[in-house]
Every structure is written in C-alpha cells, then in structure tokens.
Amino acid sequence: MVERVEIFDTTLRDGEQSPGASMNVNEKIQMALQLERLGVDIIEAGFPIASEQEFEGVQKVAAAVKKPRVAGLARANRADIERAAKAIEKAERPVLHTFIATSDIHLEHKLRMTREQVLEKAAEAVRLAKTLVGRVEFSAEDSTRSDPKYLAHVVKAAIDAGADVINLPDTVGYTTPIEIEEMFRNVIATVPGSDKVVFSCHNHNDLGLAVANALAALRGGARQIECCVNGIGERAGNTSLEEVVMAMKTRQNVYPFETGIVTEEITNTSRLLGNLTGLTISYNKPIVGRNAFAHEAGIHQHGVIASRITYEIMTPESVGRSSNDLILGKHSGKHGLAKRCADLGFTLDENEVTELYQRFSVLADKKKEIFEDDLRVLLATMRNESFETYSLEQLRTSGSDPAMALVKLKRGGEEFFDTAIGDGPVDAACQAIERVVGVSGRLQEFNIRAASPGKDALGEAHVTVLLDGKSYYGTGASTDIIEAAVKAYLSAVNKYLALQLTA
Ligand SMILES: [Zn+2]
C-alpha cells in the first residue's frame, strides 16, 4: 500500500519572515486560497504574537480556507500559546505549533537554560496547548545539532504531554541525508509512543540539501514535510515544495508515497507567490524556472520531438505548464478571457472580468500575442490595485542626466500632479510620486524581467523600497519599462500606506 505523506506548507510563516517576502493581510489570504487549491494538508499561517498585523493575518487565513488544517506558531510560553490559539480559533481544523530549542548551543547562548529546564518547559507548553487546541505539533528547534539522547528525552516528554506531531527541524541547514535518516530512525525506534504520533521534518537549504534531506527523512520514518513554495524561507530558504513533491511523484519506485498535492496547480502557485512578493526565481530553478522544461540543444530537441521520454522525466503539463503557452490575441472575446482565467485557476466575479477585459484590450493593442504570464501579471496587478491608495494616471519623462518627470496620480476621485528632477527617468518619477504622497523612500533593489518572449514583451518590474526603516516590495507591469518600474515603486508606496492604515 502506498503511504501518505502530509505536506505542511510554511510559505506564509517561515517563507514570509524571510527578507523580501513580506505580504499584507490581503496578499496572505490570496496565497492561502491558492495553497488550498494546490492541496496542501496544513497551512502554517504565521506567528501570531509577532505583531497585530501578523495576528490578523493568521486569523483571516484561518477563516478563509476550509480544507487544509491551519497552524499558528508559538514559542513554549503561555503568552505565545494563548495568542496563537486565539488566532486560529476560527479554523475548521486548527493546529497549534509550539517550539523550543534543544541543542546545547541554543541552550547556552540563546535560552540560557539547563537541559532539565528546557525539558520541563517543553512538556508544560504542550500540556497547555493541548487544553486549548485539538491538535498540537511540537518542534525541537535545532534538532540536528542536539545531543541525540537528550533529543529523545525531550521528544518523549512532548509525546507524554499529548503532542500529536513531532517535528525535528534542521534549523540551520547543517545536516546531511545520511545523518537525518539516522536521526529519525533512532528517535522513532527508542521513544515509546512514537507510533502514535506523526514525525515531521523541516529543513533549511544552506548547503543546498533541504530537498535531499527531506527525502532521506521519509526513509527514516518522517511522514510530514514542512516546505515552502519556490523554496523561499530564512536565509537560503526551506525545502522547496514543488521539488520534493515532484521527486516523490517522479521516483515512486524509490519513494513510494503519495501526497494530496494537485501538481497541475504548482505553476500557478509559484507565479502567484512571485507576483505577490517580488521574489523572482532563477531561470534554471527545477520545476518552476522558465527553462526547467526548455530543450535548447538541437540534439535534445530532435529527441524530444521524436519521443518525449528521450529527455523528459516529467511533462510540463503535469506541473500546470502548457506547452502551447500562447493563449489569446487581440480578437479574443470577454468570454474567452474568462474561460482562460478559469483554466489558470483564477475565479473572477463579473466586475473583475469586465475590469480585466478592459486592461487586456489595452495590452492587446500594444502587443500581438498575450501569454499566460502576461495574463497572470495583469490579474495580480489588478487585484493589488483594488487595495491601492494611489494609482498612476499619467507619466511623462524627458532627458536622462538629469531627467525630468511629470506624474499624475489618482486617489479616489482626486487627481494630483507633480514634477521632479532626478538621476534618470525612474528616479525622477519616483521623486515626483514622493512629493505627491508625502513620503520619502530609498530604492534598495530593482529588477526588470520580461514576462513573456518577444520584442514587445510585457516588462515586469520588482522593487524593494525602504520606507521608515522597513522594506516594502512592489511589482508593476507595462510594455514600457520605465512605466513598469514607476508602477512597481508606487505599489510599494501603496503597500506602505495600507500598512500604516491597518497598524
Ligand atoms: Zn525554519
């Protein structure tokens, strides 16, 4: 019989807390709904005690999704646990995830506690969590650098206290496949009651081993994998969801497990995350990178045309990439557009279809062929704009050094104009925006990429703007790259403004 492996997605928690991935509450909900379509078993929605906004995000995600369990993270103390329990109380099936470090390095330098104290605190935390939430996961942070005997004691204490899931994280991305397999095998063999709980792995990718370590953990007895879409997360990231899932699916003879993942939703999910956070992925990223299924070499192309299995171990369709990516042209109707959106997994209401069609027609006038990615960018931008405070109505730039820019912005029914001088047209336009809005930011990162092939491609700009000491991410799309950049800047400023309002 094929055993089931649970996919615990932490894109909204571990992923979101990584620099460059912050999302506002609405973006978190959009992402959570897509994760539900993707078929993840658990969504870790955030760390509720971290801030008011984080709490609200977890609460809203808990209420928005129906199928997956929703987890909230808490350190092993009463305040954290009560706050997390409150945030997930509306979830259909809540999970309280509490953790404490078990390595001597962390005990000495971070917690300043003895092994006995940590053991007691872990048990106490699980007992308290169990009185508040039906399902409790306990994580022994930095498991892979913990003394194996002591780790086993802590796991036993957590199980005795009522934990349902035991997670043994490789917090610093230090372990290797052989070691992690052994760690799981040992703990499961030596701790009484192990057969009554689910063991989980949570790996970081500092040495590029996160996916390999997750697969090894399965061989050691783990049956839950914590991972993130596009492998985002602290530092070098977490186990990449799409890679670990497709490794199992493609190599069933080695990893005879099944998951609930609808693999055809992988591409949509990956792109949505990219659009929401501005974290782009490299072209050669497995599964979701632009070139992951591109056969360039003539001899490969010849082979693939003759028979796909010569060089293809999985099909692009199996991960939701259509080989015929070209979707719509100038003459496509509104109905066709709505249908294509539905095929891509986006449910739009009547008003959204009308609005999207208008934007689509404008784009189709500038660009002969509209690709899936163009449509995704249009959609993401449109949905973002509904939360926006300011929209860009007009942009004019001239010169380059110095450059002059004139911008017209709209907020509600009101229009605002301003001009500024800067080092280049983008800088000048951003300064004009700042004069209108009354903020002052600093551009930290700036990337432009083509959303589709061709000389008339839609440019997608991703920016990071430092405002009031915090980074905000913005994306913008246009066939004109200056306009794309300015829209991206404005979307970061709007995010900042929106967060000021909700704070
Ligand atoms: Zn982590």
Image (cartoon, helix red, strand yellow):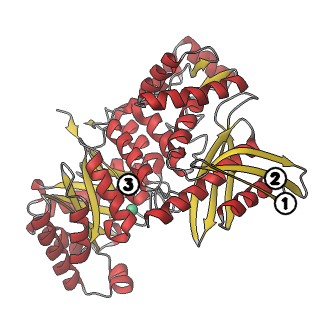
In the displayed structure image, the side of residue 64 where residue 193 appears, left or right: left
Identify residue type, mark 1.
Ile
Please give the residue where the numbered disc 3 appears in the rendered image: 177
Residue 143 occupies quadrant: bottom left
Q: Is residue 340 above or below residue 244?
A: above
Residue 369 spot, x, y in % from top left: 66, 21
Along the line of sight, the residue nearer the viewer: 462 or 499: 499
Identify residue type, mark 3.
Pro
Residue 165 spot, x, y in % from top left: 19, 57
Q: CA distance from mark 1 to mark 3?
A: 56 Å
Please give the residue where the numbered disc 1 appears in the rendered image: 421
In the picture, the disc for residue 302 is: none
Helix, strand, or loop for circle 3? helix
Residue 409 visible in rendering: yes
Residue 106 spot, x, y in % from top left: 36, 79
If the picture is divided into quarters, which one holds ligand 1? Answer: bottom left
Residue 183 spot, x, y in % from top left: 27, 61
Identify residue type, mark 2.
Ala
Residue 239 visible in rendering: no
Q: Residues within 10 Å of mark 1 (few under 14, many from 20)?
A: many
Q: Residues within 10 Å of mark 3 (few under 14, many from 20)?
A: some
In the displayed structure image, the side of residue 427 where residue 324 appears, left or right: left
Report if the CB atoms under discs 2 and 1 are less than 8 Å apart. Answer: yes
Please give the residue where the numbered disc 2 appears in the rendered image: 405
